[in-house]
Image (spheres, grey):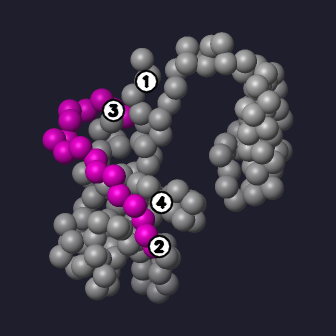
């Protein structure tokens, strides 16, 4: 049995912004460019992530999956916020229905038992200030995938998978 998924709050939708279903949102992530590389998000009732973390009563509404088609950071009085366009909102009235919702990512976790017998052990040092990742792969495909991942992490510090300790 896998542990319950964790959620990360990315933004909270404030209001429609534009005629094609765009919305203006308060931004809660330091990496808004990740909307381009990981466009699948979950639209949930406000406070959903906090309720999940504290074990509070169900909000009554389940999060719905959506896809970010476009995003940009506005300037002027809305600087520090983000404009998002979702696949399931193509007009102002559809955007109005999203007002007040949270934009979340679902983080699936695996328990330690799911890794037993997979040949994972050993150590790989990540870039300066990052945690050490312990892995060893007996399977050559898995070993190549891990090597490619580490090279990508080292090459692109903007896409930090592990925050500094």
Which is nearer the N-term, disc 1 or disc 2? 1
Is 150 included in the stretch rendered in magenta?
A: no
What is the distance, in whole Å, between disc 2 and disc 4 at their CAs?
A: 10 Å
Q: Are marks 1 and 2 in contact (CB under 8 Å)?
A: no
Earlier sequence position, callout 1 versus callout 3: 1
Q: Closest to the observer: 119 or 18?
A: 119
Q: Which residue is drawn at the image coordinates 34% and 41% (left, top)?
A: 50
Residue labelled with disc 2 = 71
- The answer to which image quadrant residue 51 occupies is top left
Q: Position of residue 18 (x, y in %)?
A: 32, 84
Mark 2 or mark 4: which is in front?
A: 4
Q: Which mark is residue 39?
A: 4
Q: Which residues are magenta?
A: 53-70
Q: Quadrant of the N terminus?
A: top left
Q: Earlier in the sequence, mark 2 or mark 3?
A: 3
Which tag, 3 or 4, sits closer to the chain's start? 4
Q: Secondary structure at mark 3?
A: helix
- The residue wearing badge 1 is 3
Residue topped by disc 3: 54
Question: Quick check: 98 left or right of 164?
Answer: left
Residue drawn at 28 percent across, 47 percent down: 63
């Amino acid at each position: 049995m896998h542990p319950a998924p964790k959620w990360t709050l990315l933004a909270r939708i404030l209001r429609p912004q534009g005629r094609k279903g765009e919305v203006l949102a308060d931004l809660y992530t330091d990496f808004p460019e990740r909307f381009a590389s990981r466009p699948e998000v979950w639209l949930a009732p406000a406070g959903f992530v906090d309720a999940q973390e504290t074990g509070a009563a169900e909000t009554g509404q389940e999060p719905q999956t959506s896809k970010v088609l476009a995003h940009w950071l506005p300037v002027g009085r809305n600087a520090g916020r983000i404009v998002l366009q979702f696949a399931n909102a193509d007009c102002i009235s559809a955007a109005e229905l999203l007002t007040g919702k949270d934009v979340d990512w679902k983080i699936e976790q695996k328990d330690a038992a799911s890794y037993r017998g997979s040949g994972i052990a050993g150590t790989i040092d990540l870039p300066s200030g990052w945690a050490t990742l312990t892995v060893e792969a007996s399977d050559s495909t898995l070993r190549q995938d891990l090597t490619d991942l580490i090279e990508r992490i080292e090459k692109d510090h903007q896409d930090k998978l592990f925050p500094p300790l």
